[in-house]
Amino acid sequence: MTAHTQTTGLRHFLDLSQVPASELRRVLNDAAAIKSRRVKGKTASDRPLAGKTLAMIFDKPSTRTRVSFDLAMRELGGETIMLTGAEMQLGRGETIADTARVLSRFVDAIVIRILDHDDLEELARHATVPVIN
């Protein structure tokens, strides 16, 4: 699985090494500019993620990741749905492929922190929305 899926144009962010340095630099520069505005008390005038929903799936608690994604989505106008491994049947009663298909119908992107990289890649293979590790 690559960061750029060739067949559909769908982009996943599964592994930092798959992102070109120039693109990573642009993302970090954009993030720094947004943070600088927030520190100065200026809110974003545009809400590019308004009407968008991000599902966040965590096998184990992750304070920094959860807070950073949740606040970033809200600051850019979007909403989040938090799902934990205990709340889901991921890989147990419900296949990973089925979970990917169901979530893809309801959300615009999926952030997942999961222990098994093969499960991450399977979820990305079956999702029709971007998957972020």
Image (tube, rainbow, N blue to C red):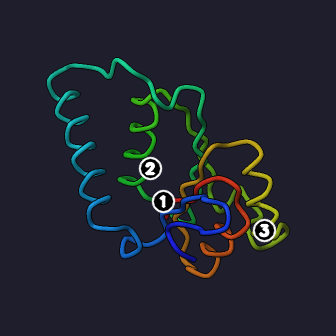
Q: Is residue 22 above or below residue 32?
A: below
Q: Residues within 10 Å of mark 1 (few under 14, many from 20)?
A: few
Which residue position is annotated with label 1?
61
Which is in the foreground here, disc 2 or disc 3?
A: 3
Q: Splitting the image into 4 quarters, where does residue 44 fall?
A: top left
Count of all numbered marks drawn on residues in the image: 3
Labels 1 & 2 near each other (Cβ < 8 A) = yes
Residue 112 locus on image (x, y percent): 55, 61
Figure quadrant of the N terminus: bottom right
Residue sitting farthest toward the right? 93
Which of 115/54 is in front?
54
Residue 85 locus on image (x, y percent): 65, 62
Which is in the foreground here, disc 1 or disc 2?
A: 2
Residue 50 locus on image (x, y percent): 53, 26
Distance of label 2 from label 3 (alpha carbons): 23 Å
| Residue type of the residue flagged with mark 3 | Ala
Which residue position is annotated with label 3?
97
Residue at coordinates 68% horizontally, 74% vertically from top-left? 122
For marks 2 and 3, the one nearer the N-term is 2
| Residue type of the residue flagged with mark 2 | Arg
Which residue position is annotated with label 2?
66
Distance of label 1 from label 2 (alpha carbons): 8 Å
Q: Is residue 100 left or right of residue 93?
A: left
